[in-house]
Image (cartoon, helix red, strand yellow):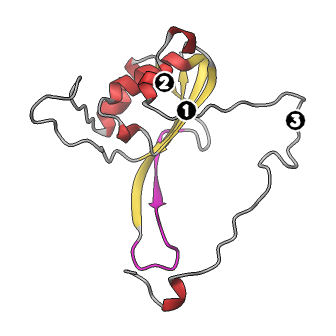
C-alpha cells in the first residue's frame, strides 16, 4: 500500500508472455540443457561426479548469498569444464551478519569488489574482454514497481570470466 502514486497502481493487469523461449530459435538439431537444483549450492554441486559438467554457469544476484564466497567460487570452478564461461550480474549486498559466536562453520567471508576480483583471478579464471564483456558496473533496479515512488537500484557487477 505504500509508495503508490494512485489507487489505480494498487491492482493492475500485467501481461506475462506464454510462449516457449525456444520458439522461433534456429537450432542445429542439438538441445541445450539447464540445471536447477533446490538446496545448498555447495552441497548440490561439489561431488566428484559434478566436475567439469557445465560449459556455462550464470550467477544472477547470487554471489552475495554466500556465507563463504570462496566456497562458491571454488564450486563454480569445479563444475565448469576447461574454457567454460562464468557470467555474473549482481551486487555485493552480503546476506550474512558477522557470526559473533563463530557457530557457523567457515565463518562469514565478505569481500570488497577489488578483493573478490583478485580471488577470482587467483582461482583459475580470466576475465573476458571485448564489447559488453569487460567487468563493469550496471545500475540495476530490483523489485521495482515502474509506477511506484520507491525503487531499489543496485550497482551490480557484471563480468564474463573463463576457466583456465
Give yes or no for residue 68 being in the magenta stretch: no
Q: Secondary structure at mark 2?
A: helix
Q: Quadrant of residue 116?
A: top left
Q: Nearer the viewer, residue 39 or 85?
A: 39
Whole-percent x, y for residue 78 in the image: 50, 16
Horizontal placement of 69 versus 127: left or right? left
Q: Quadrant of residue 105?
A: top left
Identify the mark nearer the N-term, 2 or 3: 3
Horizontal placement of 69 versus 90: left or right? left
* Number of the label disc, if any, that sits on residue 44: 2
Give the residue pinned by disc 1: 37
The residue positioned 58% from the left and 34% from the top of the image is: 36
Identify the mark nearer the N-term, 1 or 2: 1
The residue positioned 55% from the left and 32% from the top of the image is: 37
Give the residue pinned by disc 3: 27
Whole-percent x, y for residue 134 in the image: 53, 38
Amino acid at each position: 500500500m505504500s509508495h503508490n502514486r494512485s489507487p489505480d497502481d494498487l491492482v493492475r493487469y500485467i501481461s506475462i508472455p506464454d510462449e516457449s523461449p525456444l520458439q522461433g530459435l534456429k537450432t542445429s538439431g542439438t538441445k541445450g540443457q539447464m540445471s536447477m537444483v533446490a538446496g545448498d549450492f555447495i552441497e548440490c554441486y561439489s561431488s566428484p561426479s559434478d566436475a567439469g559438467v557445465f560449459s556455462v554457469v550464470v550467477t544472477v544476484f547470487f554471489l552475495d548469498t554466500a556465507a563463504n564466497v570462496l566456497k562458491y567460487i571454488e564450486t563454480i570452478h569445479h563444475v565448469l569444464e576447461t574454457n567454460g564461461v562464468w557470467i555474473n550480474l549482481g551486487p555485493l549486498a552480503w546476506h550474512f551478519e558477522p557470526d559473533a559466536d563463530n557457530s557457523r562453520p567457515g565463518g562469514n567471508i565478505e569481500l570488497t569488489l577489488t578483493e573478490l576480483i583478485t580471488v577470482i583471478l587467483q582461482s583459475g579464471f580470466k576475465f573476458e574482454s571485448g564489447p559488453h564483456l569487460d567487468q563493469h558496473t550496471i545500475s540495476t533496479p530490483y523489485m521495482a514497481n515502474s509506477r511506484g515512488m520507491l525503487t531499489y537500484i543496485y550497482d551490480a557487477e557484471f563480468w564474463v570470466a573463463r576457466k583456465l
